[in-house]
Amino acid sequence: MIGISITQVYWFKQAFNTEADRFNRDVSTALFNVANQFFEISNTAIPANNPIRQLSTNYYVVMINNEIDANLLEYLLKTEFEKRNLIADFEYGIYDCNNEKMVYGSYVAMNNKGKHAPEPGALPKWENQSYYFGVQFPDKASIITNRMGVWIFSSAVLLVVILFFGYALFIILKQKRLSEIQKDFINNMTHEFKTPISTIALSTEVLKNPNITTQPERLLNYATIIQNENQRLKKQVERVLQMASLDKEEIALKREKLDIHEVINDALKGVAVNLEERHGMVTTRLSATNTKITGDRLHIINVFYNLLDNAIKYSKNAPQIKILTYNKKDIIYIEITDSGIGMTSDQQKKVFDKFYRVPTGNLHDVKGFGLGLNYVQLVIKAHKGAIELESKPEKGSTFKLCLHNA
């Protein structure tokens, strides 16, 4: 497409130059005929040299050194131009060679709109033989362009084709990316579901053993395992269904007055087990004085749970998490800082996209669908808030939430 575009531009330029040369030839021929008619009228010998000079792209001078009647000049110019289909407005001027000054000039509209043809004898006449006249076409470029109808049409068609091709290419690349994301999501979902399903299957095999009834503690243990794994599957399914409902803008917030500090503490309880397994620590500095907001308790808790869960999962060593709250006017700010692997600027641009997961290098134990941060962003926006991210590779990340006070 680039090659075709370059070729089209080249040929369009060539066609323009060809039309310009043709226009110049037509004008020169018309002016030459006008000059010859002046020589014949005055019974003057036609000069050996060509009296026509083109001083610029649109300005022509005719050296006749003869008496000039402006009425006759304008009539002859219009007649000769019309013969050659030069239906273009022009200006002409008469120059006095002795006094070296322009003595007359006029603008001629070939379509006769806004200006009537002069009455016979209405224009001046110079009888001594020291004059020449010049002709200028103010809109020469547009005149030439108007003659290139086929080229303009073909260029317009080509432009439409290029735009269509570019759009089609954009859609193809977008579909390719969505296909890759879908494949990654299916792989992640399969991995997430495989472990609890396998655990439940093994537990049921044990429970099918008739002798298990004689071992109540063991029976309770496997029943608890099945219950826990079932809850884990339920949460994963609910998370996917939540994202689907948010995409369709079907989220219905059950708004109530919440204390943001209580919500944070509840979220911390939810990640306590995972944090303990990784030997992590959370430092809180809850300095906000106005902690009341209006929102959906379940979704707000899930927001903090997702951010804390990511902070734990994406830390190579024991997670070190800091939570800070403070007020500015009628807004409460919550900052969650971790000591994780961090993100590059390119990764930060994509991190809130659905299904996107930050590459973890040699860290292979990070589970999830890539839905968490997308969910966080959608919920915060649904509460008329904002979320910002600051991160550097190997130096952790800081998520800054802004919510309006109740």
Image (cartoon, rainbow, N blue to C red):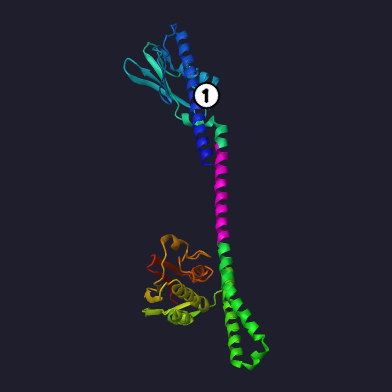
In magenta segment, residue 77: no
Q: Is mark 1 on a helix, strand or loop?
A: loop
Q: Is residue 156 magenta?
A: yes
Residue at 58% of width from left, 80% of height from top? 229
Quadrant location, the N terminus? top right
Indicate whether 292 appears above or below 54. Answer: below
Figure quadrant of the C terminus: bottom left
At 47% across and 62% down in the image, what residue appears? 350
Which quadrant of the figure has residue 157?
Answer: top right
Q: In this view, does 363 lie to the left or right of 166?
A: left
Number of labelled discs?
1
Viewer-nearest residue: 367 or 202: 202
- Tell me the crowding category of disc 1: few under 14, some 14 to 19, or many 20 or more residues within 10 angstroms, Cα based: some
> Which residue does the numbered mark 1 point to in the structure image?
86
Magenta residues (range): 155-180
Residue 247 visible in rendering: no
Residue sitting at x 36%, y 21%: 102
| Relative image position of residue 270 (x, y in whole percent) | 49, 81
Q: Please determine whether, in this image, residue 230 is positioned above or below residue 35.
A: below
Q: Please indicate whether residue 181 sits to the left or right of residue 42 in the image.
A: right
Residue 224 image-quadrant placement? bottom right
Residue at point 57% right, 77% down? 235
Q: Mostly what secondary structure, the magenta segment?
A: helix
Disc 1 residue type (three-letter): Leu
In this orientation, which residue lies closer to the viewer: 275 or 6? 275
Residue 232 visible somewhere in the drawing: yes
In percent of width and height, residue 223 lies at 61, 86
Of residue 94 and residue 302, the one placed in the foreground of this image is 302
Q: Quadrant of residue 43?
A: top left
Q: Which residue lies furthest to the left in this view?
A: 99
Percent x, y of residue 193: 59, 73
